Image (tube, rainbow, N blue to C red):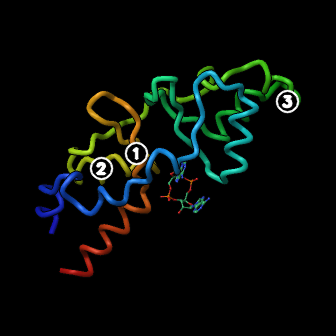
Amino acid sequence: MMQTLKNSQLVNNEINELIIPHEKVAHVHKNNPLNHALLVLIKSGYTAIPVLDHENKIQGQISKAQILDSILGLERIEMERLNEYVVEDVADPDIPTLQTDSTFGEALMRSINYPFLCIVDENGAFIGILTRRSILALMHRYFQQT
Ligand code: 2BA
């Protein structure tokens, strides 16, 4: 079974259908003020979401924890700093990206440390995300079949 999974290309696999497309992914732009990012995170309910630039390229991800950490003063949470920073000041720029022809094995390995993976096209433009949930769902389906 692992051999089948290793050899399968995302593009040829049902997993391609499991990508949550760009327009359904909650995201922020790198120049957005931090208070906007916190609003999007709270409203969407997600822990972390992708950060894009104006050319639709992935710039990293931002989480509620990073935002709270960045406004933590010595004695209190300094809410006023939410207007002083922009997303790229606090976002994590080092997140892995996959292309649609990446192997399922790569996706599986990356999802060990990352709850979602950003999928980009050949020009580096953001296509959507692959969640750990969809990767596990596909694995589960394979296990049931074998
Ligand atoms: P978390 O926000 O930490 O969410 C962890 C898991 O909790 C999700 O796993 C999902 O099973 C559930 N969950 C959380 N919020 C949900 C909601 N509003 N609706 C339905 N289920 C929800 P995954 O589905 O594997 O997602 C992994 C991570 O991918 C999420 O971590 C979040 O950081 C990101 N993510 C998922 N869908 C997203 C979307 N449409 N826009 C932006 N980010 C998304």
**Label 2 sits on residue:** 107
User: Is 103 or 109 nearer to us in this picture?
Assistant: 103
Q: Which residue is drawn at 61% across and 48% down?
A: 47
Q: Residue at x 72, y 20 (%)?
A: 85
Mark pair 3, 2: CA separation: 37 Å
Q: Which residue is drawn at 22% across and 44% down?
A: 102
Please rate how many residues cluster around mark 2, counting C-alpha atoms within 10 Å: few if below 14, some from 14 to 19, many from 20.
Answer: many
Quarter of the picture containing the C terminus is: bottom left
Image quadrant where residue 86 sits: top right
Say whether residue 107 is left or right of residue 88.
left
* Badge 1 amino acid: Leu
* Badge 3 amino acid: Met
Mark 1 / mark 2, whichever is N-terminal: 2
| Mark 2 residue CB less than 8 A from any atom of ligand 1 | no
Residues at circles 1 and 2 in contact by the CB criterion of under 8 Å? yes
* Residue 13: % across, % down: 22, 60
Residue 35 vs 110, above or below: the answer is above
Residue 19 vs 138, above or below: the answer is above
Mark 3 / mark 2, whichever is N-terminal: 3
**Label 1 sits on residue:** 117
**Label 3 sits on residue:** 79
Say whether residue 17 is left or right of residue 63.
left
Image quadrant where residue 98 sits: top left
User: Is 62 or 25 nearer to us in this picture?
Assistant: 25
* Residue 121: % across, % down: 30, 36
Quarter of the picture containing the N terminus is: bottom left
Mark pair 1, 2: CA separation: 8 Å
Please rate how many residues cluster around mark 3, counting C-alpha atoms within 10 Å: few if below 14, some from 14 to 19, many from 20.
Answer: few
* Residue 34: % across, % down: 71, 28
Residues at circles 3 and 2 in contact by the CB criterion of under 8 Å? no
